Amino acid sequence: MFQVTKLSSHLTLLATVAFGASLAAQVQTIVPPPVPGAKPATVEHIKVHSAAIEGNLEGEPADRDVIVYLPPSYKHDEGRRYPVVYALHGYFIGAEQWSGEIHVPQTIEGAIAQGAGEMIVVLPDSKTVYLGSFYSSSATTGDFERFISHDLVAYVDAHYRTLPTRESRGLVGHSMGGYGASRIGMRHSDVFGALYIMSPCCLSPMTSGGPGPADDMKQRTLESEKNAATAKSPTELAAVSPGFAAAPYATAAAWAPDPKNPPLYFDLPTKDGIPQPEIMAKLTANAPLALVDQYIGN
C-alpha cells in the first residue's frame, strides 16, 4: 500500500504516468480462501441515470453501470432494511475490473459468514474517455461528485430496502477512489456517515516538479501538450494516449474545464512545458488538503 504522505506530496499531472508501473500492480491481489459455510450474495448489474452527468461537453454517458451486491438474507427477509457501503474504484479501471481485484462477492460473503453485519455494497462505474472522472464536478466530464452523492444514493434508496440515513451509509475508495471518498465525504457529510480511504491519490496540491529526471518530465509534458493541440476530439486524444498517459487529460478535464476551449474543453496546466499559475490554481483548489479547512465541522 502506498504511504499517503509520499504519494500526495510528490504527485503531479505527469507523475501519474511515471508511477504507471507501480499503480498497475494494484490489480495483482491475493485471492483469499473461501469461508466454509458462507451463504451466497446476490449480484445485480444495473444502469443508473444521472441528471448530474447529462449534457457534459466530453460526451460521457449519463447512464452509468453499477454493480449491486445484496446480502444473503435480502431475498428471504423481506421486512428487513440494510445499511449501504458505496465503493469507488481507482483510475484506469472501472467497477467490473475492481470487483475482480477485491474478489467480490466472495469477500463479502466471507465477511458476513465470519460475523460482519449484513449490508448492501454498491460499486458505481466512473470511468471516462480518459479513464477516470476523479469523482469531481466539471462541465467537461459532468458532475460525478453529485452522481455519487445524490443521484446514485437516491436511486439505491428508491429501489432497494436500505436504511436511508447518513448513519447507515459508508463511502469507500481506493487510489482515485480514495481521492473521491475524501472529496465527497468532507463535502457531503449529511449523506455519508463513515469513510474508508485506501491509498488515496491527489490529496496535496499538484506542483510543477515530479519524480524522475527533469528532462524526461519536460519531454512527457511537451508530448502531452502536442497530442492535445492536434486532437480533434476526446476520443481521438484518448486513442493516442493509452493507459496512464491519459492521466494529464483526465485531471485537466476534471479540475480545469473550459467550455470556451473546444474540442477538448479543458486547459492543461503547462504551456511549452512551463507551468501556468492560473491553471495550477484551479488544480490546487480541488486538492482535499487545500479544501479541508473549509469542512472541519463536517
Image (spheres, rainbow, N blue to C red):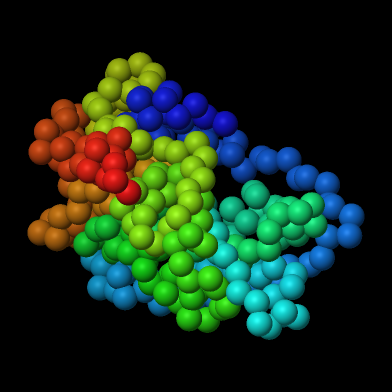
Residue drawn at x 31%, y 32% is: 204
Indicate the position of residue 182 as horizontal and vertical percent values: 39, 45
Indicate the position of residue 270 as horizontal and vertical percent values: 18, 35
Residue 112 drawn above or below residue 206: below
Residue 194 drawn above or below residue 148: above
Residue extending furthest top? 213
**Drawn side of residue 61 relative to residue 22, left or right:** left
Q: In which quarter of the image is residue 176?
A: top left
Indicate the position of residue 110 as horizontal and vertical percent values: 77, 54
Residue drawn at x 22%, y 43% is: 294
Residue drawn at x 20%, y 48% is: 256
Residue 31 drawn above or below residue 69: above
- What is the count of numbered marks? 0
In the picture, the quarter occupied by the N terminus is top right
Q: Quadrant of residue 10?
A: top left
Is residue 86 in view?
no
Indicate the position of residue 109 as horizontal and vertical percent values: 75, 59
**Drawn side of residue 84 relative to residue 165, left or right:** right
Residue drawn at x 80%, y 57% is: 113
Q: In which quarter of the image is residue 22?
A: top right
Is residue 105 in view?
yes
Residue 124 drawn above or below residue 251: below
Q: Which of 230 and 153 is in front in this view?
A: 153
Q: Which of 186 and 176 is in front in this view?
A: 186
